Amino acid sequence: MIHFVTALDCEARPLIRRYFLKPCGSYGRARFFASEKARLVVSGVGELRSAIATTALACRFPDSGKIWLNVGIAGHRDAAIGSGFISNRVSSDNSKDVYFPQIVARAPWPGIETQTLRAPSTNYQPNCLLDMEAYGFYSAALAVSTLEFIHVFKVVSDNATNIAIKTLDKEAVSESIAAHLEQIEFFAQKTLENHVIEETSDSMKAASLEIQSTQRFSETDKHWLNEKLGQLSHLLDECDKKDFSNRLIGRDKREVFDLIEKEIDKLSSQRLYTGNR
Amino acid sequence: MFERIYVEDAIHDHPRTIDLLKRYPSAEAIRCSRYGEVFNPKRQNFRVQKSNPALILAEKRGEKVLRTPAGYGLGADQHYYFSHMLNCLYDCRYCFLQGMYRSSNFVLFVNYEDFVSDIREIANSHSNEKCIFFSGYDCDSLALESLTGFANHFLDLFQNLPNATLELRTKSVNVSPLLQRGALENVVVAFTLSPDLVAKSLEFKAPTLSARLRAIAKLISAGWKIGLRFDPLIYFDNCQQVYQAFIDETLEQIPISAIHSTTIGVFRSPKTIFNNMKSLYPEEPLFMGNLQLSNGLVRYPENVETSLVENITKRVLQHIPENLLFQQK
Ligand code: SF4
């Protein structure tokens, strides 16, 4: 699941089309869109709006997947209009702190610093994009994901020879983002491949629920039980999981814990030796 | 090799920085004010970064050379350690680095000259004593030699420090920089060795046992002193037999005269580091069973640990004299 944050409708439009996103509510000015593969929020312009919208999207979908992308336009001193960049440094004229996104998949675009400004500016700096949202987006997304999965992708919309004009050519913005859609999707997919998913098998989950429904477990007990059943999910084959789950049912808490501990001791020392991993 | 190189402002113009940036012209150079800005933030994932780590060039400030904790000596009067690098090319599942650092990016401290002057000062201040300096605490000493030129630089120093010994702790077979120069009496190349099955199961990306043994043989022929590090010993079904066969096979190949020291230590980890490692690799059997918390350390139960250490010690002593063996606690 990919999460997109854009400032403008015209930035969102190509993504909405590509991922068949449907409107699904709003929070203040922020408007949500979702499909099975992606979610998107249009935040409005500015660092704070971007932060609020990012947080709102994460709250709206608490099962949020890991990958978060801020897609939008930015100014650059001399890069050609329409060229794409991935941010390797995200700074702000509003804060001393700097974020360094960790790019683990090979990015199809060159990396660059993105500096988020409080107001539009044509004071272009060398090797730096100027935008108005990235920093706010980044700060908010860090609450729900990690540096490897939060990225800022920008397309150059203005430069020293084509200074930003008051009325934005929305069609041109949509087109310039649309031109990078395949690469955006590819990059998101490659990045997502690094995401480690921790799954406890269904039979183990069911056993855990049944055991907990019949006797009193403290929070520490529950945490222990879930962690250990997660480990057994890795150690046991599929049919052994069912057998083992059945052996747990109907026993008291102490017996359950002993049985689990012994099984893990036995299986983990076998796995280490046999190389059967 | 590196797609991104972070460069700390303070060493932007350091000759080693300039040289490294020239050697990786296609890498993106990204400036930072302090390496900790990139290396230390919360909300990053060591495991995920390991698939494509970046290089961070930094200046080591403050104390560069530290005393080793009690229980980590090799019988000299003074023991110190230092780290010119943080993190490692290899990916051993038992490695404490993955639980200690949030990032698996490589940090290279380029100000070798400051390490050199601190080491020289310490060695001179103990001029009537034997000092051992361990490198490779936060990294592998030789694995990235072609990048760092670390060994070459520091061997020049130790060549002229007769009361000091340098230990290069490694699993690397990249020993050509050592073979290209004459062996030094006061330098020990210390190899961590594990049975083949343990190496295959837990020492990812590291050279195989047989490759390490071949590298040892080359070094011995060239006159270098070798350290053998049987640490960490890992408990598993049938481990006693596997370790005994491994010890026999290894020590039969290595002449006693070439052995500087042998150490034995069991897998153990401070609790916080262990919990970090476990949450990075929840599927890893090493972190699952047969462990307990004792005095802040996660380790095998005492009976398991004692029998493992005693048996391996006995076996090692069938091959080498007692004065060459040290226990790591
Ligand atoms: S070789 Fe040493 S430093 Fe490198 S990963 Fe293995 S244990 Fe850690």
Image (spheres, coloured by chain):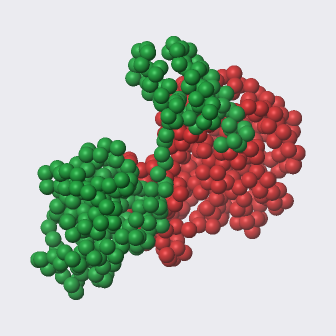
Query: Looking at the colours in the rendered structure, which chain would you say is drawn in green?
Result: A
Residue A261 vertical placement versus B97 (above, below): above
- In the rendered image, residue B163, in percent from the top left (x then y), is placed at 68, 50
Q: Is residue B28 visible?
A: yes
For the C terminus of chain B, which image quadrant?
Answer: top right
B17 to the left or right of B252:
left
Q: Residue at x 77, y 61 (%)?
A: B183
Q: Please tell me which residue lies in front, B80 or B41.
A: B41
- In the rendered image, residue A77, in percent from the top left (x then y), is placed at 26, 80
- Total marks shown come to 0
B234 to the left or right of B4:
right
Q: Is residue B82 visible?
A: no
Shown colour of chain B: red
Q: Residue at x 49, y 54 (%)?
A: A194
B231 to the left or right of B27:
right
Which of the 4 image quadrants contains residue A111?
bottom left
Q: Please tell me which residue lies in front, A277 or A174.
A: A174
Furthest toward the left, the residue is A166
Q: Residue at x 26, y 57 (%)?
A: A22
For the N terminus of chain B, which image quadrant?
Answer: bottom right
Q: Residue at x 58, y 29 (%)?
A: A242
- In the rendered image, residue B216, in percent from the top left (x then y), is placed at 79, 55
Q: Please tell me which residue lies in front, A247 or B135.
A: A247
- In the rendered image, residue B97, in percent from the top left (x then y), is placed at 54, 46
Furthest toward the bottom, the residue is A161
